[in-house]
Amino acid sequence: MTKMLFDVSACRIDTLHSDWLHRRGIRLSLLRLDLVHPVVSGNKLFKLHYFLKDAIEYNKDTLVTFGGAYSNHLVATACTAQLLNKKSRGIVRGEAAPVLSHTLQQCRSYGMELEFVSREIYRQMQEPGQFIATEDCIVIPEGGYHPLGAKGAGLITTLAGTGHTHIAVASGTATTLAGLLAYS
Ligand SMILES: *Cc1c(COP(=O)(O)O)cnc(C)c1O
């Protein structure tokens, strides 16, 4: 397996036991990606993996990414940036509310510089080639929605064990789903 930047060994597989499942011959297990890190939990660290590796390899000092006021991806980026001694900038969709969401407050606490843009501008910035990065930053699309994000999500399959017939996954940008499909 590709060397992870963080220890992922806490991600154990829990098998659920219930009569209901048992009677139907269903074995249901949960891959506990939520245990990977108290803040950067679930799929987020995996989706960031290759962007973080690039940032380190090419010596980029800032991670720039996009998200809404409740984006776990923004927090994950802010927190990993801090852990890697990098700066972070979050482009936030919509005007700043008088009181920042808990999520955005968390982003700030990890040193993320927030920039609020209208939905219109935000949408334009997401279009390929629209956001011009300066030399010292890595730009990560919203939710890691990019082949590199999916490739990182593909690393999840190395923890999933074997023998399952179905994988169920919550989906937002579907980057995680794409990675699981492409790499399993
Ligand atoms: C971010 C997140 C998702 C969405 O992941 P995508 O790769 O954008 O589809 C689903 N579930 C949880 C708990 C998340 O934090």
Image (cartoon, rainbow, N blue to C red):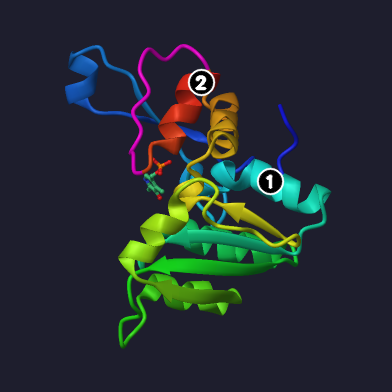
Which residue in the rendered view is the most extreme toward the bottom? Answer: 98
Q: Main secondary structure of the magenta part?
A: loop
- Residue 163, magenta (yes or no): yes
- Residue 14, magenta (yes or no): no
Q: Is residue 52 left or right of residue 98?
A: right
Quick one: SS at disc 2? helix
- Viewer-nearest of discs 2 and 1: 2
Q: Residue 72: percent from the left, percent from the top?
A: 43, 58
Is residue 39 in view from this perspective? no
Seen in the picture, residue 63 relative to 41 is either above or below; the reply is below
**Residue under numbered circle 1:** 7
User: For residue 105, which quarter of the picture?
Assistant: bottom left
Seen in the picture, residue 39 relative to 160 is either above or below; the reply is below
Seen in the picture, residue 19 relative to 135 is either above or below; the reply is above
Q: Depth check: 172 or 125 in front?
A: 125
Say which quadrant the N terminus sits in.
top right
Q: Residue 107: percent from the left, percent from the top?
A: 51, 72
Q: Residue at x 36, y 68 (%)?
A: 69
Q: Residue at x 55, y 48 (%)?
A: 129
Q: Residue 42: percent from the left, percent from the top?
A: 47, 46
Q: Which residues are magenta?
A: 162-172
Q: What's the mark number on residue 89?
A: none
Q: Quadrant of ligand 1?
A: top left
Q: Residue at x 41, y 30 (%)?
A: 177
Q: Residue at x 48, y 75 (%)?
A: 115
Classed neighbour count for the residue bearing mark 2: other residues with Cα under 10 Å, few (<14), some (14–19), many (≥20): few
Quick one: SS at disc 1? loop
Q: Is residue 58 left or right of residue 87?
A: right
The three-letter amino acid code for the residue at tag 2 is Ala
Q: What's the mark number on residue 182?
A: 2
The three-letter amino acid code for the residue at tag 1 is Asp
